[in-house]
Amino acid sequence: MRLLLALLLLLSPASPELAARESIHSGRLALLLKVRGAIGPASRDFVLRGLEKAKERDAAVAILELDTPGGLDSSMRDIIQAILASPVPVLGYVAPEGARAASAGTYILYACHVAAMAPATNLGAATPVQIGGLPLPARPPSKDRPDDSSVPEPAAPPAAEPDARPTPAAAGDMERKLINDARAYLRSLAQLRGRNADWAGQAVTEAASLSARDALQKGVIDLIAADVSDLLRQTDGRLAEIAGDKRPLATRGLNVETVLPDWRNQLLALIAHPLVAYVLLLVGIYGLFFELANPGMALPGVLGGICLLLALFAFQVLPVNAAGLALLLLGLVFMTAEAFVPSFGALGLGGIAAFIAGSLLLWDETGPGYEIPLGLVLGFALASAAALIGLATLILRQRRQPVVSGAEALLGATGTVLGGNPDRAWIRGESWQIRADQPLRPGERVRVEGRNGLTLFVQPLGYDKEEPPP
């Protein structure tokens, strides 16, 4: 009887554990994913795993809380594809107050089923960024060139307008390709979600930005919410298109669960930054070089191996340019060879040039928060050249020093012919059998020129000034 009672109590709807389970499986759950900092491999992994978790938990909605300056294009597009394919509605929310969704964050917000912002936040500045972290010059629209992706671009770059920023001739074609691609992409997201497509084009071509209130007035976002609770309250009843089907959202009274990055995301965020991966690569190469130059030290080899493996892991998830990596390694080889080959500085200068070029071309893309400062590259190039050439020079000097032990240590040593036996000489505190091309006299100084077993071949040096011949 007691057992039956216990089972009834356990299965009762009043049980907190069962209520929690029913809440989860009946879609009464909202997963909150907080994306902070630059968009990169770590944030991509975090969002994708979070959306998958929302699907497994049968959550009603997933809330993507954004505060980002932008990031890598490849990671941004993976996040957007996951949002578009998600069976769980995704609410994009720029928060807390003072946050921003710039560059890549603007694209992600446009892709969400509902776009919201907290007061005192902003979005925009979605102009693509070229390799090296320099923004491509944006040209504002004019009467002859309206901001519409449907207008075909001319076959040749148009002449610079008086109010436009100058475009480098070498970067003209690449600039137009990147800007046109980014503009069309953001406009397609705006058209999909029924938001302001014209301003989407301005955000790309003119790097335009908007405050939360202006974004709401222009139809760029759907609502302004003070906090997550206010967001869920205002979202309740809105229509969201999921897999081509429009259905109302039931978000009132949802239990909000915050998903935090695990150790894998934290490790990836630490090392999957181009600047950190670049430093890890150099430290790894230096460590292995020092270990090979001085076998047995152990510490440089262990440290270098760990850093090199971490760098290779980071390169696996980062957009690495193979030509840039090859140039960087070639530069290190040239700078090392400068100390061994008499090239009168040609290898050293060529190595520095290849190192700098490889460092600048190492990444296929960069973005806000993922730039590598030119000063750091130049500093590493000069420090690498000085360290590698200096170390190699010390190694060569060490190898050229006379041998101080073993059979070869006697070569070049001097001694004195013994008085009682001219066929023996006192050399380095020992009596040795000697041979010479001419007769030797007792007390004469000799120098060792060769050795055969226990016999030394010597050349006479004459007598010391203070020691006259007998």
Image (cartoon, rainbow, N blue to C red):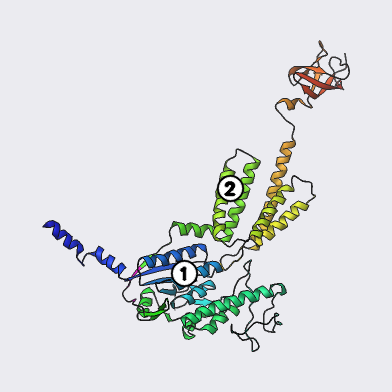
Per the image, the residue denoted by label 2 is 304
Q: Residue at x 83, y 18 (%)?
A: 435
Return the x and y of residue 414 as percentages of the image width and height.
80, 23
Q: Nearer the viewer, mark 1 or mark 2?
A: 1
Q: Residue furthest top?
A: 420
Crowdedness near tag 2: few (<14), some (14–19) or many (≥20) residues, C-alpha within 10 Å:
many
State left or right for residue 171 relative to residue 306: right
Query: Which residue is at the front of the view, 298 or 55?
Result: 55
Per the image, the residue denoted by label 1 is 82
User: Earlier along the polypeptide chain: callout 1 or callout 2?
Assistant: 1
Q: Residue furthest bottom?
A: 143
Which is the main secondary structure of the residues drawn in magenta? Answer: loop
Return the x and y of residue 302 as percentages of the image width and height.
56, 44
Depicted 111 relative to depicted 434: above or below: below
Depicted 71 relative to depicted 305: above or below: below
Q: Amino acid at mark 2?
A: Gly
Give the residues in magenta.
Answer: 248-256
Return the x and y of residue 417 as percentages of the image width and height.
82, 16
Instruction: Give the secondary structure at mark 1.
Output: helix
